[in-house]
Amino acid sequence: MPDILIDTAERVMTITFHRVDKKNSFTRTMYAEMAQALTQAQTDPAVNVVVFQGHESVFSSGNDIADFLQTPPTSQDAPVFQFMRAISTFTKPIVAAVCGPAVGIGTTLLFHCDLVYAGDNAAFSMPFVNLGVCPEAASSLLAPQRMGYGRAAEALLLGEPFLAEAALEMGLVSRIVPPTEVNALAQRQAQKLAAKPMTSLLATKRFMKQGQADLVAQRMAEEGALFGRMLAEPAAHEAFTAFMEKRRPDFTQLSAAS
Ligand code: COA
């Protein structure tokens, strides 16, 4: 069974993360498949809405760390950056259904979704600093805008997780329901969107995002370039190796040396 399932029915394309044994972490192949699906959906008249969903127990634990260590995304053509560009420039509505952990890009991709529904077990985190890297997917721009600077600083500088209630309060999430009901709710809302006049939907989303597109693209490119370089540096190497070795990272020697 593939790690990304793509199904289109009644003008809704549903992209399901299907790698639960690895907590739905994203490999290069998965990013490439998701970028390709979005590119196709963008021009396909049979698709009006896209839904992203994971499993009741986990949305996504972000980048596959082993994959990142082996093949770090050093160029802007890397699948991870293709996916980020595709989701951030997608002009049709995007709905997300989030349960359990949403780590790294598992959270930052949500800044590019229009409606986000969460299970009461959802836990969002952007632990880039703890991993020795920097924000991605324009989250250094969009998190302060969406969450307010103080809460974004707790999430991005401290890398502290926040739960579904906090995400609802800050407007990242539209509604919280039991995990067993999230995917069905997202599908119902997507069906409602899919039945609306497409030209009105496209115009409304475009107006809501007007003025942001260039800023987002520029920030994403700047973050991506630095992120790629930081992956090759000792802090990220220590953080990622520690994760693979199931131990706590130790940055103390690094700070003394640098
Ligand atoms: N990359 C690669 N493998 C990952 C992964 C990731 N991002 N997240 C989880 N996995 C793997 C684990 O290595 C483990 O593999 P194993 O069974 O072969 O040992 C398996 O998925 C289960 O993960 P585990 O950590 O045991 O599950 P958990 O329920 O205790 O914790 C998380 C779940 C999501 C909280 C935890 O896995 C986590 O913090 N993952 C890393 C998230 C991260 O830092 N992402 C940002 C990357 S930039």
Image (cartoon, helix red, strand yellow):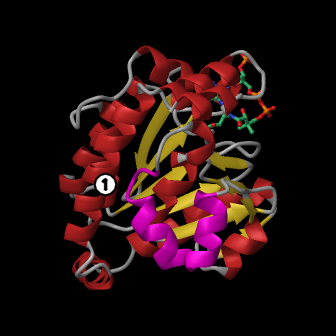
Q: Tell me which amino acid carries mark 1.
A: Met
* Tag 1 residue: 220
Q: Main secondary structure of the magenta part?
A: helix
- Judging depth in this view, the residue of 183 and 105 nearest the camera is 105
Q: Is the residue 66 above or below the residue 23 in the image?
A: above
Q: Is the residue 191 above or below the residue 127 in the image?
A: below
Position of residue 93 in the picture relative to residue 59 (left or right):
left
Query: Residue 83 placed where, x, y %?
Result: 33, 43
- Judging depth in this view, the residue of 241 and 108 nearest the camera is 241
Q: Quadrant of ligand 1?
A: top right
Q: Is residue 191 visible?
A: no
Report the residue at 60% width, 58% height from top: 157
Q: Quadrant of residue 229?
A: top left
Query: Residue 158 placed where, x, y %?
Result: 67, 56
Query: Residue 39 placed where, x, y %?
Result: 23, 46
Q: Which residues are magenta?
A: 135-157
Query: Residue 10 placed where, x, y %?
Result: 41, 58
Report the residue at 62% width, 19% height from top: 241
- Judging depth in this view, the residue of 48 and 70 nearest the camera is 70
Q: Quadrant of residue 153?
A: bottom right
Q: Is the residue 179 above or below the residue 73 in the image?
A: below
